[in-house]
Image: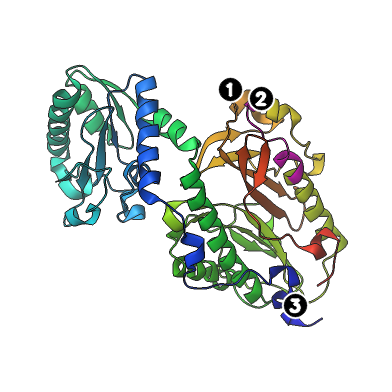
Amino acid sequence: MDLDWHGQRTDLKDICLVELDPELHSGIDLPAVRRYRLQRLRSEMAAREIAACFLFDPINVRYATGARNMQVFHMRNPSRYLFVPVAGPVILFEFTGCMHLTQGLETIDEVRPATTASFVAAGERIAEVEKQWADHCADLVRQHCGAGARVGLERVNAGAALALAGHGFDIVDAQAPVERARAVKSADELRCVRTSIRTTERAVHRLREALRPGMTENELWSILHQGVIAQGGDYVETRLLSSGPRTNPWFQEAGHRRIGANELITLDTDVVGCYGYYCDFSRTFHAGPEAPTQRQQTLYRIAYEQVQHNLQLLRPGLGFREYAERAWDIPAPYVANRYYLSAHGVGMTGEYPYLYHRMDFDQAGYDGVLEANMTICVESYIGADDGAEGVKLEEQVLITEHGPECLSEFPFEPALLGTGSF
């Protein structure tokens, strides 16, 4: 068998990598996207009688305003945050030297320098700096929301939160209004989602085309990064590419292992792509040069069946428990290594809701109802507890008024499904 078979797939002929395809980005109204998201957040805050939120998670800051700045850095440093009142000015407290980055964003009324309340920045003065932060924030809340207001916080130091509560405010977690806001997408948001998926699919095509026995997992995985970034995406959130015996159990990260002949290679994209929107689909490939074994095909077909069955259940009004009860039954040999979720929400990252397997629902599940314009990822991992390899498949789906629409279009492997050859 010719080792070049990876580049000969006829069903991949329309997927090619270009640095930037203007057609994929046409028709996207980013100001409308930003306005919709801010309005969604404020509506969810009002429903919970939260007068204002302080957001530290850079993804949530971006959701509310469109402002992006060193997103990964600010996931671990409390040096940039956003004040969002239900009514009043949206104020971004920006990182040192970055005040100019948000010029032109209609969602931000004012930019001020941030107070970085971290031990790295303040050293042994951390309690003093946390008090300074709380005093400034308290003045802001009293000015725009009144004394004793309910304030939503996320990802802030315990000392800072306690200091703010000491000013007499009702401190609550900001996760609920943010996650519920993010769950339902506008038509303009969905254009961003589709663009992120299409560009990521092109990068995955390049990865698949380059796959050869003898290359390391890291070498193969790096091709995904190059393709994503060349087309305007941000970064890959996880390192989920593995080969051969490292495909079972799941969640083994890409490393220096060299891919062997005729092994399975599993990939979960987990890409924060164009416009900050997540592309999250999974595929399993075969290294060649020979045909997949019957055992490899069996694993693949079972995973494919799980994804397709559960995908078809998704529709507005379906309760989370009802979904769990109707979802595909995982065969006994694969239960121990099952993926921890049956499906999950997705937007600018993985998000609300989590949909659990029936066997896990009573312990981990919660009530809720699927809504139109939610985007959901349907998961499958199939690998026996004592098995040599495993298969990871996943599809990204839009829930429409009429049922599910599959957003991820990257083809499955005919040779692994047993419906075709290399």
Identified at 82% across, 58% down, the residue is 417
Residue 162 in which image quadrant = top left
Please, what is the three-letter code of the amino acid marked with disc 3?
A: Trp
| Alpha carbon separation for disc pair 3 and 2 | 44 Å
Measured Cα–Cα span from mark 1 to mark 3: 47 Å
Q: Residue drawn at (38%, 50%), measured in percent from left and top? A: 30
* 382 to 358, vertically: above or below: below
Quadrant housing the C terminus: bottom right
Q: Give amino acid for label 1.
A: Asp
Residues 304 and 127: in front is 304
Position of 357 relative to 113 (above/below): above
Return the residue found at the far front: 27
Left/right of residue 375 with respect to residue 105 in the rendered view = right
- Mark 1 or mark 3, which has the lower sequence index? 3
Q: Earlier in the sequence, mark 3 or mark 2?
A: 3
| Label 2: how many Cα within 10 Å (few below 14, some 14–19, many 20+) | many
Q: Quickly name the residue at label 1.
A: 367
Quarter residue 161 falls in = top left
Could you tell me which secondary element the residue under label 3 belongs to? helix
Label 3: how many Cα within 10 Å (few below 14, some 14–19, many 20+): some
Residue interval drawn in magenta: 308-321
Does 89 sit above or below residue 68? above
**Which of the labelled discs sits on residue 321, or is there none?**
2
Residue type of the residue flagged with mark 2: Arg
Q: SS at mark 1?
A: loop
Q: How many marks?
A: 3
Residue 209 disc label: none
Q: Quadrant of the N terminus?
A: bottom right
- The residue to which callout 3 is attached is 5
Q: Secondary structure at mark 2?
A: helix
